[in-house]
């Protein structure tokens, strides 16, 4: 699943991915506000004929639950599907995994739901996620999704992912990059190797973090996410420093998790020492999650954090969009190990639902260019549809540019049965214990690796 074309030209790389002209030279504009949806927001590719009125219970999470975009698109879907009603229940990312697993175990889960890709194996083991191949193969829209996006939703027990039945469709492509305060960088006289002047390497990332950190102000270089959801940030920063989650023993047949190797332990030590030794993270880092890392950037407490397009306006509207710099995840000592948490959040259908056909209609609409284009232009993101790649809106946006520039480094977690619990509980607990000195970085990695190996 990992994209490894590290040396090809950016234009060739984007052609390979299917993004086409989206990789053209981009200007520095921010994601603008666009007018409300019009009557042309309709589904153009129906899949099955729903013969009776049905209600589809749908759960997801949104970075900004007050944004009116999602309710608008539900309304448009229902207008074009008069027999289907969406009973929408939004929530927070930090609670979604546990809430979903508990509901599925009790037999009261939703008909369709958003999930992290790394939860697929766990939900398949609970018989709570339906294989979609029969629906997908009859859906005309399948030809308009990037193959490298859809491939991550295939799962087969005993394998790390990318093979077997299809279990989800993409919601939005939200690969991570690095935000940094350009005004603070200018203030301390920092210029990095990236063409924008931002940090192009992890050494430069640390240098900038050290230069702007001043606890007396208070001001810190890096908003580390030690709480739930911080696995992606850790995956890319430690990954670029040499951490590797898994490797083949016998290619295509036998594999193992590799967090307990010397190289992975050293990379994790480098990352955790940003807090424990370098002191470039705020004191709250061991428990900080999404709200805190964004809030720290907005309040002027921190200079840098890893996130994605959907927080451009959240942060930029507060600190000033011209002060919000963006670069791909910086590279570590070995460019071949450059890693960014990439791909797209996913939507799936409950295997126990009695309305699977209608549920698939709904998640197929979410993956369609009608939904994707309107959603991305209102909230941020890169559409999963090649048919939208030439839209000037996406070509002329520096945050889209940074997302696509990091495409050769995109990687995703394995989809084994233990990854959901790893992401939701095992990793946050181990990270908090490591950052607070209860365990060493080495013990953290050995414990996590043992858990993953035992829960394949």
Image (cartoon, rainbow, N blue to C red):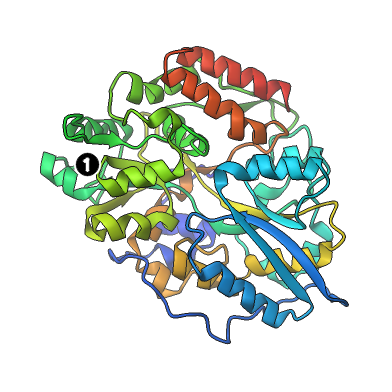
In terms of depth relative to the viewer, which is nearer, 408 or 268?
268
Total count of labels: 1
- Which image quarter holds the C terminus? top right
Residue 260 picture location, percent across and down: 56, 17
Task: Tell me if I can see residue 7 in this picture.
Answer: no
Q: Residue at x 69, y 22 (%)?
A: 453
**Left-right relation of 261 to 152:** left
Residue 270 picture location, percent across and down: 38, 22
Residue lying at the far bottom of the rendered structure: 39
**Left-right relation of 185 to 73:** left
Residue 192 picture location, percent across and down: 22, 41
Q: Residue at x 62, y 27 (%)?
A: 247
Q: Residue at x 28, y 57 (%)?
A: 318
Task: Tell me if I can see residue 259 in this picture.
Answer: yes
- Which image quarter holds the N terminus? top right
Give the secondary structure at mark 1: loop
Badge 1 density bin: few <14, some 14–19, many ≥20, Cα 10 Å: some
Residue 59 picture location, percent across and down: 67, 56
Query: Would you place residue 136 above or below residue 282 in this image?
Result: below
In terms of depth relative to the viewer, which is nearer, 374 or 61?
61
Query: Would you place residue 107 above or below residue 223 in this image?
Result: below
Q: Which residue, given by chain and number where applicable, does mark 1 sit on?
A: 192
């Amino acid at each position: 699943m990992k994209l490894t074309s590290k040396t090809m030209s950016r234009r060739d790389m984007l052609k390979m991915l299917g993004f086409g002209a989206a990789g053209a030279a981009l200007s520095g504009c921010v994601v603008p506000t666009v007018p409300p949806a019009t009557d042309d927001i309709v589904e153009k590719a129906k899949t099955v004929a729903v013969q009776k009125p049905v209600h589809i219970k749908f759960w997801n999470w949104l970075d900004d639950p007050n944004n009116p975009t999602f309710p608008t698109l539900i309304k448009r879907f229902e207008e074009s599907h008069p027999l289907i009603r969406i009973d929408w229940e939004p929530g927070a990312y930090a609670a979604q995994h546990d809430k979903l697993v508990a509901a599925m175990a009790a037999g009261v889960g939703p008909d369709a739901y958003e999930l992290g890709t790394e939860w697929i194996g766990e939900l398949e083991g609970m018989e709570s996620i339906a294989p979609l191949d029969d629906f997908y193969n009859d859906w005309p829209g399948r030809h308009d999704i990037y193959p490298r996006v859809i491939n991550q939703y295939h799962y087969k027990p005993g394998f790390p992912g990318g093979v077997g039945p299809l279990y989800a469709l993409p919601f939005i492509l939200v690969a991570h990059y690095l935000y940094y305060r350009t005004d603070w960088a200018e203030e301390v006289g920092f210029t990095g190797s990236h063409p924008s002047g931002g940090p192009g390497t992890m050494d430069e990332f640390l240098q900038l973090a050290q230069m702007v950190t001043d606890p007396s102000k208070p001001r810190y270089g890096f908003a580390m996410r030690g709480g739930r959801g911080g696995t992606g940030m850790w995956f890319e920063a430690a990954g670029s420093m040499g951490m590797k989650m898994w490797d083949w023993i016998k290619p295509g047949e036998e594999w193992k998790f590799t967090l307990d190797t010397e190289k992975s332990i050293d990379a994790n030590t480098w990352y955790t020492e940003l807090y424990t030794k370098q002191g470039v993270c705020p004191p709250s880092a061991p428990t900080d999650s999404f709200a805190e890392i964004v809030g720290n950037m907005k309040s002027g407490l921190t200079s840098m954090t890893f996130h994605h397009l959907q927080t451009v306006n959240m942060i930029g509207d507060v600190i000033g969009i011209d002060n919000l710099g963006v670069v791909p995840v910086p590279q570590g000592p070995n460019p071949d190990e450059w890693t960014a948490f990439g791909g797209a959040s996913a939507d799936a259908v409950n295997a126990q639902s009695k309305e699977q056909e209608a549920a698939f209609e709904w998640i197929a609409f979410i993956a369609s260019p009608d939904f994707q284009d309107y959603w991305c232009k209102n909230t941020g993101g890169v559409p999963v549809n090649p048919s939208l790649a030439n839209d000037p809106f996406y070509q002329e946006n520096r945050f889209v540019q940074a997302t696509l520039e990091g495409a050769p480094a995109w990687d995703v977690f394995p989809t084994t049965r233990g990854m959901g619990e790893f992401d939701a509980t095992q990793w946050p607990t181990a990270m908090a214990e490591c950052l607070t000195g209860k365990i060493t970085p080495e013990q953290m990695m050995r414990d996590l690796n043992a858990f993953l190996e035992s829960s394949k």
